[in-house]
Image: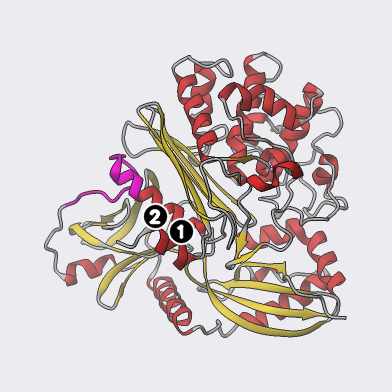
């Protein structure tokens, strides 16, 4: 097994910090690596951006006001908002936006996340972010799905809650969070201040993307509720211990009943703040985070166990998963660690019945196929895992908590799969043979392109067409997957303005095939291109799906001079 330092070097992660909770207390905390290449070492007190782990910490403040009787989880948020109101439309006629919906991502609100603002950029007010007006970089935050009918991750919703807390308390969010949550939990190094005060700059692990320091350093996130927390793993461990104490009625922040409501799933395993899960009676709450150059993960069982891992690299997602699996094995958690199973003697012919693509209930696709003779399971946009039989209808991974259980009809044909990973479960029917063949061909060819560092043959033309369509304000949504089409519709005004400001495209050059996924670190066949425009230079990423439609695309400025 490779050492932690070797994995950090392989993945380009300068620094990582870990805290472990055992038997209801912080058992140990330690930093590894450096705060920046050539810089001082990471310690247990080094600050990282918590990114979206800000959300469950912020949720505690909302729930504190609920317990005080100042807010109701299921009331119309417009009853509390004063400075700004959620615009009513056809989606809110019979169902209103509520705090329970916002905190569980089921309120029907738009805007998934935020890129932050580079050093020196003008910062918007909260109202400017809500309305998507300059200098905000996000589109307007609006309701475009009937509240309560669909789970859809929305950092935008948390900005609504940020404004609501300001209107109700009259106190700036960083101070309210400090007095209400951070200080009572002993999170003395943590703050929601954005930007971080210059006097604390020497405490920070600098962010890295593509093994290069983020140009200008850490981005600023005025979207404090969804993304603005600066903290350490030890302080996040104190948050987790505070939730565990609240469940026992031992918290001054929220009651036991409110803590239980917080950890009750609303839609798709998302509670009122944290995600909740667990494959056994031992339930856990968790949340991940992804800001520019930072990746982090919190996992805490209700019974006083858990861990927090924070990294200062966009490739830290893979590393923190490996660290969590190791900790789960050491501390014998029922989830996350590889499960001990008995290998069954099943003939290849019987196992080959399981090969195919499966359309999961969350919209994802799970492919089972053979790679160099071995059986592989691949949840598209996640790492493929070698699978082994525990029976003629159940497969498992040796190095991760992954189990795939298949349903067979009376004729012995496979009709569906139930896929469990780290205590979370998805299921879905088998796709028809044509789609199964297309999906499996796609994933195998993508892996080969990645190995050979070759672009998808349609990537460049897809980028050129997308840029042209955006400049004219008329995207071809038929060339996009439904999810990417939704994102494009939502952000079209901002996207059109950005493309027009860059001017005429002068050149587009393939750079590399990249590993993609939530952290762009698992096989999937995405491509990076360097684009030189009349007024700017950017790196453009695109990923095409098995059917040739655009699944994801994005751009970021490069740390080199714009052309004159």
Q: In this view, does 340 lie to the left or right of 443?
A: left
Q: Which residue is drawn at 39% across and 75% down?
A: 437
Decide: is 383 above or below 271. below
Q: Residues within 10 Å of mark 2 (few under 14, many from 20)?
A: some
Which residue, given by chain and number where applicable, does mark 1 sit on? 318
Q: Is residue 170 left or right of residue 41?
A: right
* Residue 103 seen from this side: yes
Q: What stretch is highlighted in magenta?
A: 326-341
Measuring from the top left, give residue 408's x and y in whole percent. Answer: 25, 57
Q: In this view, does 69 lie to the left or right of 563?
A: left
Measuring from the top left, give residue 40's x and y in whole percent. Answer: 57, 54
- Tell me the quarter of the image containing the C terminus: bottom right
Which residue, given by chain and number where applicable, does mark 2 sit on? 322
Measuring from the top left, give residue 401's x and y in whole percent. Answer: 32, 50
Locate residue 506: give its quadrant. Answer: bottom right
Foreground: 563 or 374?
A: 563
Q: Determine contact: label 2, label 1, CB under 8 Å.
A: yes
């Amino acid at each position: 097994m490779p050492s932690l330092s070797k994995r950090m070097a392989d993945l380009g992660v300068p620094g990582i910090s870990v805290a472990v909770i055992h038997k209801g207390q912080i058992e140990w905390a330690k930093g590894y690596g450096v705060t920046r290449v050539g810089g001082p070492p990471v310690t247990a007190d080094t600050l990282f951006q918590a990114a979206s782990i800000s959300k469950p910490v912020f949720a505690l403040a909302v729930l504190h006001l609920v317990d005080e009787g100042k807010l109701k989880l299921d009331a119309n948020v417009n009853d509390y908002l004063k400075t700004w109101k959620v615009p009513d439309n056809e989606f809110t006629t019979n169902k209103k936006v509520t705090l329970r919906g916002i905190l569980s991502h089921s309120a029907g609100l738009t805007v998934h996340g935020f890129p932050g603002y580079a050093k020196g950029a003008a910062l918007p007010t909260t109202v400017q972010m809500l309305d998507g007006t300059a200098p905000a970089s996000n589109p307007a935050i609006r309701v475009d799905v009937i509240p309560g009918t669909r789970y859809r991750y929305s950092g935008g919703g948390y900005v609504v809650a940020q404004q609501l807390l300001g209107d109700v308390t009259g106190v700036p969010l960083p101070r309210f969070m400090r007095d209400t949550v951070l200080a009572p939990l002993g999170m003395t190094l943590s703050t929601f201040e954005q930007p971080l005060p210059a006097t604390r700059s020497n405490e920070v692990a600098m962010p890295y993307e593509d093994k290069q320091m983020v140009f200008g350093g850490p981005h600023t996130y005025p979207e404090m509720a969804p993304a603005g927390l600066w903290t350490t793993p030890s302080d996040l461990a104190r948050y987790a211990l505070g939730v565990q104490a609240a469940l026992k009625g031992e918290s001054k922040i929220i009651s036991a009943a409110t803590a239980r409501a917080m950890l009750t799933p609303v839609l798709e395993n998302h509670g009122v703040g944290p995600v909740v899960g667990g494959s056994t009676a031992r339930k856990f709450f968790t949340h991940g985070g992804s800001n520019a150059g930072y990746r982090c993960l919190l996992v805490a069982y209700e019974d006083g166990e858990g861990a927090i891992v924070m990294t200062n690299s966009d490739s830290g997602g893979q590393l923190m998963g490996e660290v969590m699996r190791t900790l789960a094995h050491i501390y014998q958690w029922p989830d996350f660690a590889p499960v001990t199973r008995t290998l069954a003697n099943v003939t290849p012919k019987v196992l080959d019945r399981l090969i195919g693509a499966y359309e999961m209930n969350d919209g994802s696709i799970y492919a089972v196929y053979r790679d160099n003779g071995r059986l592989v399971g691949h949840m598209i946009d996640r790492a493929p895992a070698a699978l082994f039989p525990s029976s003629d209808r159940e497969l498992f991974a040796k190095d991760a908590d992954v189990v795939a259980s298949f349903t067979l009809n009376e004729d012995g044909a496979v009709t569906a799969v139930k896929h469990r990973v780290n205590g979370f479960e998805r299921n879905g029917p088998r796709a028809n043979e044509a789609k199964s063949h297309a999906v499996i061909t796609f994933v195998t060819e993508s892996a080969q392109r990645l190995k050979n560092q070759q672009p998808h043959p349609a990537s460049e033309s897809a980028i050129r067409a997308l840029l042209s369509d955006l400049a004219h304000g008329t995207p071809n949504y038929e060339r996009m997957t439904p999810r990417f089409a939704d994102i494009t519709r939502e952000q079209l005004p901002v996207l059109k303005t950005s493309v027009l400001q860059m001017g005429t495209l002068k050149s587009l050059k393939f750079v590399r095939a990249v590993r993609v996924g939530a952290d762009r670190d698992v096989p999937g066949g995405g491509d990076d291109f360097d684009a030189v425009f009349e007024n700017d230079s950017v790196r453009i990423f695109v990923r095409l799906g098995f059917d040739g439609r655009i699944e994801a695309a994005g751009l970021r400025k490069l740390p080199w001079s714009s052309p004159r």
